[in-house]
């Protein structure tokens, strides 16, 4: 069967005081390494494009298509980026693979056309709802949108960082509803687009099919897919210490400062799955359950107070010490 061409699509809202522009540049560069003939599209606003005059690197030289969306001046950048994502299907013609900017491409992506279904995504954190670390948070956001247990307990919750979307009437209808639901989530003080994606999928009888996890390997949860990773998603918007460097900030800041990618930088991009720190431990099964329990969360918070933590830790160690010294 003859496959249709696919566009590789990025949504980009960036200003001079952030590094989203540089992250997109790095991701597209990695895409060109592995899929050199890729047709790359950027969906953006005029302010982002106008800012290129004040930047040291020009992203327009490595893309094939730029599509602009106008916004009223009072719309914040985060909301702009969500609006871009939730309206892309009806602004971009042709089948596309949407890719978040905070990604590194690790393999040839042209195989995406082998999928016969019309809409695909990868599970959030590579887990069904009942094993997802953020289950309670997901359910809370779902309830805020539609308080129906059949919906908020549904096991499939997809990450929106990589979306394979064919150009069909049903998918265009899906994105119309996706945008409507995002506006609803925003009114409920939810600044994410994934809850809207989840609700739309439920309302339209689950058109989203599951892509293999290799298409969106989510940093701290995707170890089972490292060996065949196609897209590595390192999450630039995390609000904790789990920042995957050098891609989180070091490399984007270097590109912003230097205006080019050095040979050393290109080597980093070519092998992105090597930077998890000098001490790394994979937690799974029962250990995973314990690590993500409320008890563990309490002790992780307590660990911030090192002196107090050491005292309590020693008190727990004393029975073992007494047993070893006197009761063996």
Image (cartoon, rainbow, N blue to C red):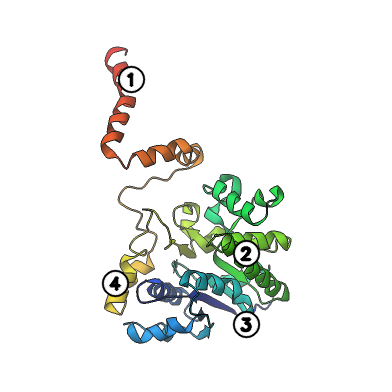
Badge 1: few (under 14), some or many (20 or more) residues near its Cα, within 10 Å?
Answer: few
Instruction: For the residues labelled 1 and 4, say whether their Cβ atoms are less than 8 Å apart.
Output: no
Any mark on residue 184, and which? 2
Separation of marks 4 and 2 at Cα, in angstroms: 38 Å
Residue for badge 1: 319
Q: Examine the image and state in which quarter residue 180 appears.
A: bottom right
User: Is 271 situated left or right of 39 in this image?
Assistant: left
In space, the residues marked 3 and 1 are separated at their CA atoms by 68 Å
Report the residue marked by disc 3: 93
Q: Position of residue 91 (x, y in %)?
A: 61, 81
Disc 4, SS: helix
> Do residues under tags 3 and 1 come within 8 Å of each other at their CB atoms?
no
Q: Nearer the viewer, mark 2 or mark 3?
A: 2
Residue 128, position as x, y percentages in the image: 60, 50
Q: Secondary structure at mark 3?
A: loop
Q: Quadrant of the N terminus?
A: bottom right
In the displayed structure, would residue 66 be above or below residue 197?
Answer: below
């Amino acid at each position: 069967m003859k496959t249709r061409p696919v566009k590789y699509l990025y949504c980009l809202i960036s200003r001079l005081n952030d590094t989203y522009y540089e992250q997109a540049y790095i991701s597209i560069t990695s895409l060109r390494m592995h899929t050199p003939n890729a047709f790359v599209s950027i969906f953006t606003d005029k302010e982002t494009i106008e800012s290129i005059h004040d930047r040291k690197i020009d992203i327009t030289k490595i893309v094939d298509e730029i599509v602009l969306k106008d916004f009223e001046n009072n719309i914040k950048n985060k909301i702009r980026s969500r609006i871009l994502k939730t309206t892309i299907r009806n602004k971009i013609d042709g089948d596309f693979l949407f890719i978040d900017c905070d990604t590194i491409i690790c393999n040839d992506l042209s195989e995406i056309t082998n999928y016969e279904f019309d809409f695909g995504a990868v599970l959030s954190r590579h887990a069904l709802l009942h094993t997802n670390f953020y289950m309670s948070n997901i359910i809370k956001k779902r309830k805020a949108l539609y308080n129906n247990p059949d919906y908020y307990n549904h096991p499939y919750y997809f990450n929106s960082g990589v979306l394979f979307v064919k150009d069909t009437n049903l998918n265009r209808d899906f994105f119309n509803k996706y945008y409507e639901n995002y506006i609803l989530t925003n009114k409920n003080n939810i600044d994410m687009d994934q809850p809207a994606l989840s609700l739309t999928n439920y309302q339209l009888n689950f058109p989203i099919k599951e892509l293999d996890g290799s298409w969106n390997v989510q940093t701290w949860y995707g170890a089972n897919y490292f060996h065949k990773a196609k897209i590595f998603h390192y999450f630039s918007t995390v609000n904790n210490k789990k920042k995957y460097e050098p891609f989180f900030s070091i490399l984007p800041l270097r590109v912003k400062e230097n205006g080019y990618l050095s040979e050393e930088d290109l080597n980093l991009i070519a092998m992105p799955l090597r930077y998890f720190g000098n001490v790394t431990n994979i937690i799974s099964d029962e250990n995973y359950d314990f690590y993500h329990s409320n008890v563990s969360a309490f002790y992780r918070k307590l660990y911030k107070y090192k002196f107090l933590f050491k005292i309590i830790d020693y008190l727990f160690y004393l029975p073992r010490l007494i047993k070893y010294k006197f009761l063996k």
